Amino acid sequence: MKSLNRILLFALIFIVAACSSPLKMYKIGNYERAVTESVRKLRSSPNKKKHQNVLVQAYPMAVQMAKRDINNALQSNNVTRYDVVIKRYEQLNRMARDIYTCPKALQLIPAPEEFHAELTQTKEIAAEHYYTQGVRALNDRTVQQARNAHQYFVKANEYVRGYRDVVSKIDEALFAAMLHVVVQAPKTPERFQVSADFFYSNLVTEMNKSNQRRYVHFYTPQEAQNEGMYDPHQLVALDFIDFTVGNIRESKSSQDVKRDSVPIEVEIGGRKTTAYITAKANFTTYKREIISAGKLRVQIVEAASQRVADQRTFDGSYVWTTVWGSYTGDDRALSSEQKKLAQQQPTLPPPNQDLFIEFTKPLFTQVVNYIQSVYRNN
């Protein structure tokens, strides 16, 4: 088996090496990759004629193709045309750097072309281009165009860090792009309010965390008020429509147990000797369960019309258990586990506030997954 694995590994390495060989890349027209692979090979094998020939033939083809892509992009009206130009200039500069750092490659290509000034100038042009596109999209005052604007401003800032007032524009566009959702806390009896608030605050935090790559933000009512956001797009209404905490269920079960060949010491005719008996006992196991369970209804409500756009009800439960035992008869008939149970007393249950938190834990995961599915397209 080891030999077979070794053969398969060598075969895989050979296939990968063949697919990325300079000559293979050259034949399929991937000239930039052919240059990169040739230079890499020449660093370790500078006298390899095959790699030398590929580099000499592939480099001018790679430069020609990159320049053609640059010219075609600049002549187009595509919004992303400067991305193509910048990418090609970076490829040209990367090939030149590779050649300059390989003595044999530099001997074969003594003056590789560099385009640092052109790259810097294009990044400036691209920053202005995306900034202008962002302003235009933001002025459209729709959520979708605000999202486009945000991406344009981010792109402008990537090309020229801090271009004009792009940082504030990013924040402005992001706020306009967001679907603002206020999550309403569930109403519970006063004795459970602390636990309900704990569940609620953690839920809002996790909802934002799990959706942080999307254009949606969840607020508590207080957070929305603090940010001056009085007209949210949607509401998430949480309601415990049915729950119980602290229901007690008790049970017990008894069984006759015995153990054969239990040694005892006896005296026969004045002499002590060992005899074997069967030890018997009746063991009773007691179980006390504290059951907490409930249903949480989640409604997605359009804030302006108060229309319920979607809703789901989730179930959660938690059972706290304590077990102990007792016996009558000979304790030598008991197993080690039974002896341990017989020494135990029933444990006091946690406070009802803690039981409330426990039964909401499965609800927490279900609600977060549901919210992710509802807002996955934002």
Image: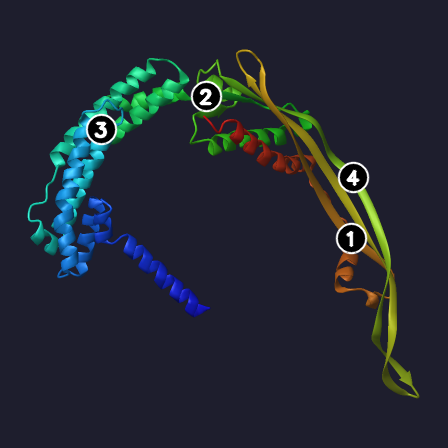
Numbered marks: total: 4
Circle 4 packing at 10 Å, graded few (<14), some (14-19), many (20+), is few
* For the residues bearing labels 2 and 4, Cβ distance under 8 angstroms: no
The CA distance from mark 3 to mark 2 is 30 Å
Q: Give the mark nearest the N terminus, 1 or 3.
A: 3
Q: Where is mark 4, residue-wise?
A: 248
Quadrant position of residue 196: top right
Q: CA distance from mark 2 to mark 4?
A: 45 Å
Marks 3 and 4: CB-CB under 8 Å?
no
At label 1, the amino acid type is Trp
- The answer to which of 74 and 19 lies nearer the viewer is 19
Q: Secondary structure at mark 4?
A: strand
Q: Earlier in the sequence, mark 3 or mark 4?
A: 3
Q: Which residue is mark 1?
A: 324
- Please state which of the two labelled residues, at mark 3 or mark 2, is closer to the viewer: 3
Q: Secondary structure at mark 3?
A: helix
Q: Amino acid at mark 4?
A: Ile
Residue at the location (32% across, 55% down)? 16
The amino acid on which the numbered mark 3 sits, given as a three-letter code, is: Tyr
Closer to the observer: label 3 or label 4? Answer: 3
Q: Which residue is mark 2?
A: 179
The residue pinned by badge 3 equals: 82
Query: Counting residues from the N terminus, which is met first, the one under dot 1 or under dot 2?
Result: 2
Q: Position of residue 217 (x, y in %)?
A: 46, 25
Could you tell me residue 121's position as x and y percent? 15, 29
